[in-house]
Amino acid sequence: MRLMANIGSGLKGKVGLSRNAQRISVALVIFFVVIFILTYTVMPHRVSLEVGKPSPQTITAQKEVVDHHTTNLLKEEASEAVPETFDFDPGVLQEAEEGAAAFFTGILALKELEDPEEREEKAGETLAGLPFDLEEDEFLALLETEREKLSGMQRSLNLMLRDILGQGVNPAGLDSTYRDLFEEVEKEGYTGELGAAAQTLIRHYVQPNLVYNHEATQRAREEARLAVEPVRILKGALIVTEGQQVTETHVAQLEALGLQRQGADYGILFGLSIMVLMIFAAVGIYLFLYEKDIYDQPALLLLYGLIVFITLLFSVAGSIFSGYLIPTAMGIILIAVLFNHRLALLTTVVFGLLTGLVTGGDFRFVFIALLGGLVATYGVFKVNRRDDLAKAGLYVAALNAVAIVGLFLFAGEVRLEYDFFRSFSVGVLAGVGNGLISAVMAIGLLPYLETGFGLTTSVTLLELANPNQSLLRRLLREAPGTYHHSIIMANLAEAAAEAVGADPLLARVGAYYHDIGKLKRPYFFCENQIAQTNPHERISANLSKLIITSHVKDGVEIGRKGKLPQIILDIIQQHHGTSLVAFFYMRATECSPDREKVEESSFRYEGPKPHSKEAAIVMLADSVEAAVRSMVKPTAGKVEGMVRKIAREKLNDGQLDESNLTLGEVDRIIETFIHILSGIFHTRIEYPERELLGGEGNGA
């Protein structure tokens, strides 16, 4: 759908700025407005709470985040709960048993010596050679102990060694192990010096046989940390209530949510500005390369920015209730109708990005925004009636509902629970409401935007094409010949516009109204002279020329009073260009005594020449239809010859020079005219007089 506007450079004259300055000013205004809205939407409203002081307000989570503080505390608890890892050393028990056996064997060997001096000497050597400190009186107590009791002590010591060292002795629990063994010694009846000797032996032979494994311990503790699931702060969760004493946990949770002010938010603001600036740059480059008509008119840029602003406001409001309710389709419908579908598709991507910013990057809502924009663009691709906009909203609503069902299935959230059905129902209803609200708001805003910016959209043209329009009804009653001429012309113009890629609807409506100036003096135009004398036969050629050419100026005046849009007034003003009023020029020449004194320029229309393809098509259709209709017994060959002759004359006269029509397009227009006119003005069968009298006929 092509934009139809005539708002030119009025701003320049009013504000005294160059077009570039206007363009930059508009871009800056739009940029700062968008940044302002996003700043108070995307950036969190931060607080500054201090530990130990009461909170000045109740704060809830505006989004779902990981509670790193609580998660780390749980990880530390899990890590500390993991016991240290020790490696068992079997050599300690073997060495202790062998050492104890050797010690008691030595004691028993000393007891076998009968010579006291030798025993004393050997005893001194044995005591000095022991690998541990044993008091002399303890050693003597062992030597004086009976063999059987000494053997019993050895057996008890071996049992203790096997029992304790078999279980494993931790260095940290060594003192506790000694105490338990000493109690066992007392229970066995070893007291005094003998009991002290037994304790000395226990201290020596009972050594830790569990070796601390640092790597295994750290690995186990790290596994315990990783096994802890992150604690999440759910959206809407209560963080702190008003008056509640603030703790470190509260502050940490607020920091995780981005709500705790730690300084100015310049970094966030700068990053947001960079992202928005990149979006603006992409749109600006696209407009410069592919939409020069829009890029060169600051007023149209302002309109585009206004639509973005309105859509963004409604998006922020919708996101408060549900991200599915963000009505980006509203803006896309307005842009597709007021501008064109290519720009609407690009803006769909822009609105998808802005939706991501507003909703914190939630894929679901971005997907719905993109889908809604695409469906809306398709829905208004060809608008034949105003209610087509409502149909586009229904398309968006239906596709949103299906897409939301798909999103719930994709997320694996389907379950037979109340919470699921509640969220599912709200989501689907929000998606349907999105489409309906978009259509209603677009239909409501469209007339104001059209009027405020002087635009003419296809919706307005459709309303003007209604035969019940007051000007068309006047034309039918007061100038019926002109009315029917305009109807046939409209069919020609519409088909020709389709053939060359111009706007068919604009060409048709322009053809309907191009001759409304004839309402002022309808009987001076031959198509309205039914059973009447021709008034031009009684006046001069110059006066006839003035009357004929004045229908252009009269048409513009009548159109302005009838509040026709400027683009239709342009077609009315340009549909004759500066063409020559040939009939009355030839008549003036014939009647002039000195034919050379009749200036051709005085018998031309004031113009201007057609400035658009649609105006040029209306010019050609007007001339061709009138010429062919005046032919007597037209044949296909005569029609083709006449059409080509008129088109050639307009080209040679320079009437199409400013219309942007190429020679190839002119040729396609000619072929279209020939095809249609050959069907309209075909040769008809002459009915026999008998059939006419009898009222019978077969039609042709």
Image: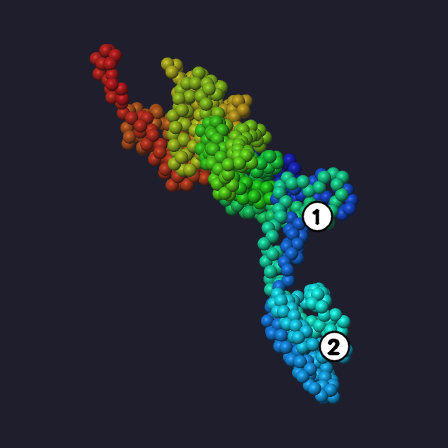
Question: Which label belongs to residue 516?
Answer: none
Front in this rendered view, residue 685 or 501: 501
For the residue labelled by badge 2, is the local secondary structure a helix, a strand or a loop?
helix
CB atoms of marks 2 and 1 within 8 Å: no
Q: Which residue is mark 1?
A: 249
Residue at 40%, 37% in the rendered image = 500
Indicate which disc, 2 or 1, sits on the residue closer to the N terminus: 2
For the residue labelled by badge 1, is the local secondary structure a helix, a strand or a loop?
helix
Q: Amino acid at mark 1?
A: Thr
Residue at 40%, 20% in the rendered image = 481
Spot occupied by residue 630 in the image (x, y as percentages of width and height): 34, 24
Spot occupied by residue 631 in the image (x, y as percentages of width and height): 32, 25
Q: What kind of colouring is applied to the model shown?
A: rainbow
- Relative height, residue 590 to residue 122 (above, below): above
Q: Which residue is mark 2?
A: 141
Is residue 497 something one can see in this rendering? yes
Residue, far top: 694
Residue, far right: 53
Q: Amino acid at mark 2?
A: Ala
